[in-house]
Amino acid sequence: MDPQVFLTIGSFLKWIGLIASPLLLFPLFILVIPKPLHDAGERLANGLDAAIEWALRAAMLAAILLFLLQLIVVIASYALALTATWLSESVIYAFAAMFMLGAASALRDDAHVRVDILRPRFGENGRNWIELAGTYLLLFPICIRLLTTGEQGLARAWSLFEGSRESDGLPLLFLFKTLVPVFAILLILAGLSVALRAALRLTGFEAPVDPASPQERHYGA
């Protein structure tokens, strides 16, 4: 297939992202005018959580694939004295897919490692404001930066259908590089979900989360 087709699709997706970017401000609108917007905010948060859940399932499949591939590599290397670049690269690709597709669900469920030591000392409202500030001041700018800086390299990789630099490697390097913007987009979606729920809690339209217990979510509710 002509690579230009994929570049055209990429440009189309870019414009969709630009058009949808004002949605990132929706949690702030909820803080200003909560009553008319809380239902829409709840539905949007549930929709984002459902999309992230699909990414999590893909990450779980990648984890299973990673285990099987690594087992094959170990058996082939130590039992049969066989090596193959494509097999080693497939392990790397599976690990990358597992991490980059699963990171958004970790952010959504507050399962990632937190480095802030002051957050537990604040009350519920303080924690919600920290979530909003961290999302808008750190998460969104970094993810948008990832999307903008890698655009040209990714376009070149797709135009060439870039493959491995090794003769017996996988011809899928362009897909491997695509994981980076996918990772950034999923984190933006997860950050928007976190910000929406923080705004809903601040305005009293969602029950507070007990920091001492696992956070419960109901997808598609």
Image: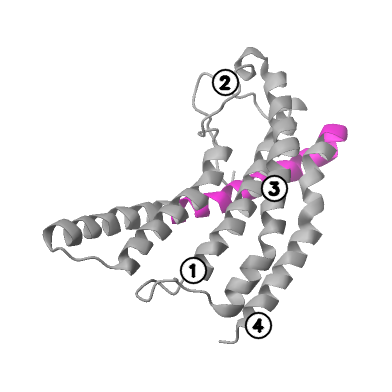
Q: What distance separates the C-alpha of mark 3 from that of mark 4?
A: 34 Å
Instruction: Examine the structure image and report whether residue 40 is included in the region drawn in magenta.
Output: yes
Q: Amino acid at mark 2?
A: Asp
Query: Looking at the image, which residue sits at the far front?
Result: 166
Instruction: Report helix, strand or loop for mark 3.
Output: helix
The residue that mark 2 highlights is 210
Chief SS of the magenta region: helix
Q: What span is in magenta?
A: 31-58
Q: Amino acid at mark 4?
A: Gln
Q: Is residue 216 left or right of residue 130?
A: left
The residue that mark 1 highlights is 173
Mark 2 vs mark 1: give the one in front. Answer: 1
Q: What distance separates the C-alpha of mark 1 from that of mark 4?
A: 17 Å
Q: Is residue 52 left or right of residue 8?
A: left
Mark 3 vs mark 4: give the one in front. Answer: 4
Residue 152 in percent (x, y) is at 68, 67
The residue that mark 4 highlights is 4
Image position of 221 with respect to 55: above or below? above
Q: Earlier in the sequence, mark 1 or mark 3?
A: 3
